[in-house]
Image (tube, helix red, strand yellow):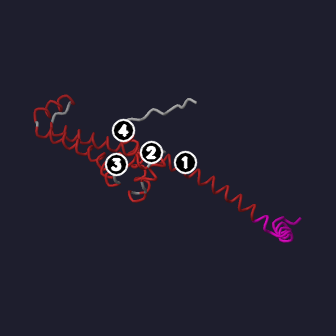
Amino acid sequence: MLRIMAKPQPAADSAQRILDVAERLVQTRGFNGFSYADIAEALRVTKASLHYHFPSKADLGRRLIERYALIWLMSALVLLGLAVWKDLLEILSKAMGIVYPPNALFMIAFGFVLLLLLHFSIAISRLSGETKVLAQVVARLDQELRAVTGRAEETQLPAEAAVEQTEVTTPRR
């Protein structure tokens, strides 16, 4: 019998997938509200494979923080470099059509903030889509539950009570 094996994914890709799921869980449940079992279930992998990439939950949390810290660190280094290297700032400001070079620093910082806001907007959009799907599932389950409990109540009523109930609800002519 021929078995088809799935192509193994690179370790970096697996680590990014783990971080993506962990980030979503942190956003929805909080850091203490999920476990490695939740991540393993979402990715359909073993907990051991999670521990291979992140030996402890603290390591996972540190890497999640590093994702955002690197964005802020890079933007701060760029702004610091431009503030110190005056000639480069003047060249950039002339290229952007800005007369006063310090305004170019403000514009670049504003660009970094806009990129960060775009990232958060994408994350919120993804979460709102997931929330919409969950709300639909809950509504469907609630409807099914009401239908089941309604049928259960009908079967529990004695025949006389059912007749009396229908007489009360039907209008008299």
Q: Which mark is residue 125?
A: 2
**Measured Cα–Cα span from mark 2 to mark 4:** 28 Å
Q: Which residues are magenta?
A: 153-173
- When the figure is inspected, residue 149 is found, relative to residue 43, above or below; the finding is below
- When the figure is inspected, residue 33 is found, relative to residue 71, above or below; the finding is below
Give the crowd class for mark 4: few <14, some 14-19, many >=20 residues within 10 Å.
few
Task: Tell me if label 2 and label 4 are in contact, CB under 8 Å.
Answer: no
Name the residue that disc number 1 marks: 133
Name the residue that disc number 3 marks: 54
**Measured Cα–Cα span from mark 2 to mark 3:** 28 Å
Q: Position of residue 9 (x, y in %)?
A: 41, 35
Element under label 2?
Answer: helix
The residue type indicated by label 2 comes to Ser
The residue type indicated by label 3 comes to Phe
Quarter of the picture containing the C terminus is bottom right
**Mark 3 or mark 1: whose residue is earlier in sequence:** 3
Q: Nearer the viewer, residue 13 or 129?
A: 13
**Mark 2 or mark 4: whose residue is earlier in sequence:** 4
The residue type indicated by label 4 comes to Ala
